[in-house]
Image (spheres, rainbow, N blue to C red):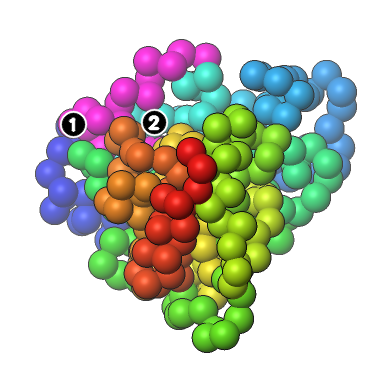
């Protein structure tokens, strides 16, 4: 079993392109053939009408689980659909083996609607540290890659999040109202402030990509499922951005975060958004 971080870095130096190929192949085999062609029997509800899963989600995750496990012997895969079937599998994120965190179709609702705003998210982590991530938007053929300490790239071009334009409202994407409790809605009311413009988020992975590209100033999310956040958080970090929880600490993929939390183009913006969230009527 590979458990040494240096060895994982050697693995990434040799096999990052193989991971990219696995992500692209999973999308080509299981996601794109069903895009705008889903039959009714290929779509199911999980917790409710706004929490959907499709055959594309299940089969793409199975494809990635097999491919990624074969690439890195001794690693484990924590996928959204596997955790839905058996919540105990989520605990692998906190254990000693390297872990692949997989969201096969991030933005399933957009995918079901036939919209292009969905992504396949894969992250390699070890002992709670994010090491590499792949954010692939199949319908747009865009691939963003981040490797810790080596920067973030979109289709081979280096990403720089930069800083918000002085004097303009901060643009913040927040947890979609359909996915928030009343208490979470109250917490997010802190962002109803002068100088801030909010909107409901779409695919979390693509919102993080927008931050890394300097197209969105920040997010404010009220849930901590690692498959939604791991890839994007590393992407933003490597593009120069920052993230903070309600307690003022960075977000941890191992859980136990004070929510909501924010990810932003720079540390100053993250601090400003976190402070506004703290002022919300929780």
Q: Position of residue 132 (x, y in %)?
A: 35, 54
Whether residue 144 is situated above or below residue 65 in the rendered picture: below
- Give the number of the disc on residue 210: none
Residue situated in front as seen by the camera: 34 or 187: 187
Q: Secondary structure at mark 2?
A: strand
Residue at left offset 55%, top offset 47%: 188
* Magenta-tinted stretch: 85-104
Side of 118 relative to 281 (left or right) = right
| Magenta span contains residue 87 | yes
Q: Secondary structure at mark 1?
A: loop
User: Crowding near pointer 2: few (<14 within 10 Å), some, many (20+)?
Assistant: many
Residue at left offset 29%, top offset 61%: 148
Residue situated in front as seen by the camera: 70 or 156: 156
Name the residue that disc number 1 marks. 96
Residue at left offset 18%, top offset 31%: 96
Question: How far is disc 1 from disc 2 in space, using C-alphas?
Answer: 13 Å
- Give the number of the disc on residue 77: 2
Mark 2 and mark 1 in contact (Cβ < 8 Å)? no
Q: Position of residue 7 (x, y in %)?
A: 16, 49
Q: State whether residue 66 appears in this view.
A: yes
Q: Position of residue 101 (x, y in %)?
A: 41, 38
Q: Position of residue 41 (x, y in %)?
A: 83, 19
């Amino acid at each position: 079993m590979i458990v040494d971080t240096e060895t994982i870095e050697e693995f990434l130096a040799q096999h990052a392109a193989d991971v990219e190929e696995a992500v692209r192949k999973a999308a080509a085999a299981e996601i794109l053939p069903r895009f705008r062609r889903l039959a009714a029997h290929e779509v199911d509800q999980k917790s409710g009408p706004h929490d959907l899963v499709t055959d594309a989600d299940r089969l793409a995750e199975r494809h990635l689980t097999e491919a990624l496990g074969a690439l890195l012997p001794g690693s484990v895969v924590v996928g959204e659909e596997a955790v839905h079937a058996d919540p105990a599998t989520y605990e692998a994120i906190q254990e000693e083996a390297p872990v692949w965190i997989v969201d096969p179709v991030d933005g399933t609702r957009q995918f079901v609607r036939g919209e292009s705003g969905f992504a396949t998210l894969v992250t390699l982590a070890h002992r709670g540290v994010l090491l590499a991530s792949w954010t692939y938007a199949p319908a747009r053929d865009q691939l963003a890659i981040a490797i810790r300490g080596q920067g973030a790239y979109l289709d081979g071009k280096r990403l720089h999040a930069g800083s918000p334009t002085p004097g303009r409202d901060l643009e913040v994407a927040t947890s979609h109202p359909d996915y928030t409790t009343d208490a979470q809605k109250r917490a997010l009311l802190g962002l109803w402030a002068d100088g801030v413009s909010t909107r409901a988020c779409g695919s979390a992975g693509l919102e993080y990509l927008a931050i890394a590209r300097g197209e969105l100033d920040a997010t404010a999310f009220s849930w901590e499922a690692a498959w939604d956040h791991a890839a994007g958080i590393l992407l933003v970090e490597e593009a120069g951005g920052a993230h903070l929880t309600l307690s003022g600490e960075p977000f941890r993929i191992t859980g136990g975060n004070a929510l909501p939390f924010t990810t932003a183009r720079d540390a100053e913006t993250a601090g400003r958004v976190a402070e506004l969230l703290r002022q919300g009527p929780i």
